[in-house]
């Protein structure tokens, strides 16, 4: 296993981290607990020492399964990262209540890495209103948290604002060769590093979209490369080139993926992408981006919709649907991550959003299209 230095922790962290939001399933829609525990323990046995979960992963089961996996001496061998679901906060009291619920689920004395989960403009405002950072600092003083960070899902300008507003120990951003300039992007990675803030990477495979169903034109690019690699290998090769990264989270859902990843992350080659390989990867990234159908910039001028429809998020799911070869996983994600009232079915075609959209997108038509594809 390759490692990166975590200076604040005075320790080395495995370059491959285990994301626990996509545990193996049993075929009947339930998490296969035995397999999930085997996966966690095998990862640790093979040198992974960063385990990442959140309050909402598998409806809280992720934390409970980690608790079981970390018995018998495994706890001492790994950092555990968990996240505060800021969007569920109503009052200050909720911060401590949710934190201690998580700590109890994990059955550990200290949560090593604790993140403000999914910072967006709305959740950041809510976090400030509920004094989240001050309360997390108190919890640290009381010995329940070691390092405080945040994970990010909004525009770059907010990323800088958040980075500059607190003495963070680390942060977590989405990064892959398709989303180079999306949200924090490479620019955000460099900005955090300029402030000595280590960066944890999520979605290096874009939630499996760039590995599950690879469009024929992308397959041709990989076939034409001098060195033959799997789509996952190309994706990790691109991400691992950045020395600013502390660890790269991968949400593996079977042992085959785990062993493939362990193999990749045990060779120095993964950190040394050649100029020629970089050119191949960038061509694939350009092609994926050209498959984007609706040119939504995510500016959110169309919000708020009077019916609460999450317009930019819906357009993103729809764009992914076309770019990633109608991946059925997207239907599940749409219905899991968007509340029923945020979904396209609630659009009443009032037209308010279209007047505000600087890209002049036919949003009403797009909502109808999205509902036809993703609606239940
Ligand atoms: S047209 Fe639909 S999505 Fe747009 S503001 Fe009206 S209800 Fe919301
Ligand atoms: S205003 Fe238009 S471009 Fe901006 S987020 Fe809404 S749909 Fe996308």
Image: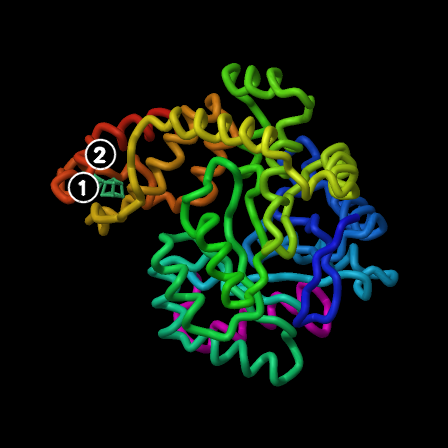
Q: Look at the picture and state if 348 lies above or below 192.
A: above
Return the mark for residue 363.
2
Q: What is the secondary structure assignment of the residue under circle 2?
A: helix
Q: Is residue 54 magenta?
A: no
In the image shown, does 215 or 332 lie closer to the viewer?
215
Q: Residues within 10 Å of mark 2 (few under 14, many from 20)?
A: many
Let me know if residue 258 appears in the view.
yes
Find residue 75 and report its image quarter: bottom right
Q: Look at the picture and state if 375 lies above or below 336.
A: above
Q: Are marks 1 and 2 in contact (CB under 8 Å)?
A: yes
In the image shown, does 72 or 180 lie closer to the viewer?
180
Residue under the image location 77 percent in, 57 percent down: 68
Q: Look at the picture and state if 118 lies above or below 263.
A: below
Q: What is the secondary structure assignment of the residue under circle 1?
A: loop
Residue under the image location 29 percent in, 33 percent down: 295
Q: Is residue 102 magenta?
A: yes
**Quarter of the rendered structure image containing ligand 2:** top left
Residue 376 percent location from the top left of the image: 40, 30
Q: What residue is disc 1 on?
A: 357
In the image shown, does 260 or 314 lie closer to the viewer?
260
Mark 2 sits near ligand 1, with its Cβ under 8 Å away: yes
Q: Look at the picture and state if 8 lies above or below 45.
A: below
Badge 1 or badge 2: first in the primary sequence: 1
Q: Is residue 106 left or right of residue 155?
A: right
Mark 1 sits near ligand 2, with its Cβ under 8 Å away: yes
Task: Look at discs 1 and 2 and give the one toward the viewer.
Answer: 1
Residue 166 percent location from the top left of the image: 46, 74
Which residues fall within the magenta stretch? Answer: 88-111
Q: Is residue 174 left or right of residue 236?
A: left
Residue under the image location 33 percent in, 26 percent down: 293
């Amino acid at each position: 296993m390759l490692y990166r230095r975590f200076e604040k922790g005075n320790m080395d962290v495995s370059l491959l981290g285990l994301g626990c939001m996509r545990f193996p399933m049993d075929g009947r829609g339930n998490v296969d607990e035995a397999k999930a525990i085997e996966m966690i323990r095998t990862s640790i046995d093979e040198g992974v020492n960063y385990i990442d979960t959140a309050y909402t992963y598998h409806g809280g089961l992720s934390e409970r399964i980690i608790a079981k996996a970390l018995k018998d001496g495994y706890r001492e061998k790994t950092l555990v990262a968990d996240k505060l679901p800021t969007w569920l906060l109503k009052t200050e009291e909720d911060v401590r209540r949710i934190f201690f619920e998580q700590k109890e689920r994990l059955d550990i004395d200290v949560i090593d890495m604790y993140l403000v989960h999914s910072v967006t403009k709305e959740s950041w405002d809510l976090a400030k209103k509920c004094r989240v950072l001050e309360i997390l600092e108190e919890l640290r003083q009381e010995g329940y948290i070691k390092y405080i960070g945040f994970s990010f899902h909004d525009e770059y300008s907010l990323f800088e604002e958040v980075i500059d507003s607190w003495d963070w120990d680390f942060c977590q951003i989405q990064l892959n060769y398709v989303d180079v300039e999306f949200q924090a992007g490479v620019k955000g990675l460099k900005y955090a590093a300029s402030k000595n803030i280590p960066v944890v990477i999520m979605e290096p495979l874009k939630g499996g979209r760039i590995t599950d169903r690879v469009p024929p034109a992308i397959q041709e690019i990989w076939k034409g490369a001098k060195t033959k690699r799997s789509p996952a290998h190309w994706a990790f090769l691109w991400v691992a080139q950045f020395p600013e990264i502390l660890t790269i989270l991968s949400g593996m859902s079977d042992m085959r993926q785990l062993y493939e990843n362990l193999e990749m992350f045990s060779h120095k080659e993964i950190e040394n992408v050649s100029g020629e390989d970089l050119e191949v990867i960038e061509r694939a990234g350009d092609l994926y981006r050209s498959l984007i159908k609706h040119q939504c910039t995510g500016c959110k001028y169309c919000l708020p919709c009077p019916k609460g429809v999450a317009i930019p998020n819906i357009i993103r799911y729809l764009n992914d649907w076309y770019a990633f070869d109608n991946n059925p996983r997207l239907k599940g994600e749409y219905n899991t991550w968007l509340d029923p009232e945020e979904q396209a079915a609630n659009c009443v075609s009032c037209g308010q959003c279209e007047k505000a959209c600087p890209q002049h997108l036919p949003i009403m038509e797009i909502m109808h299209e999205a509902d036809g594809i993703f609606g239940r």
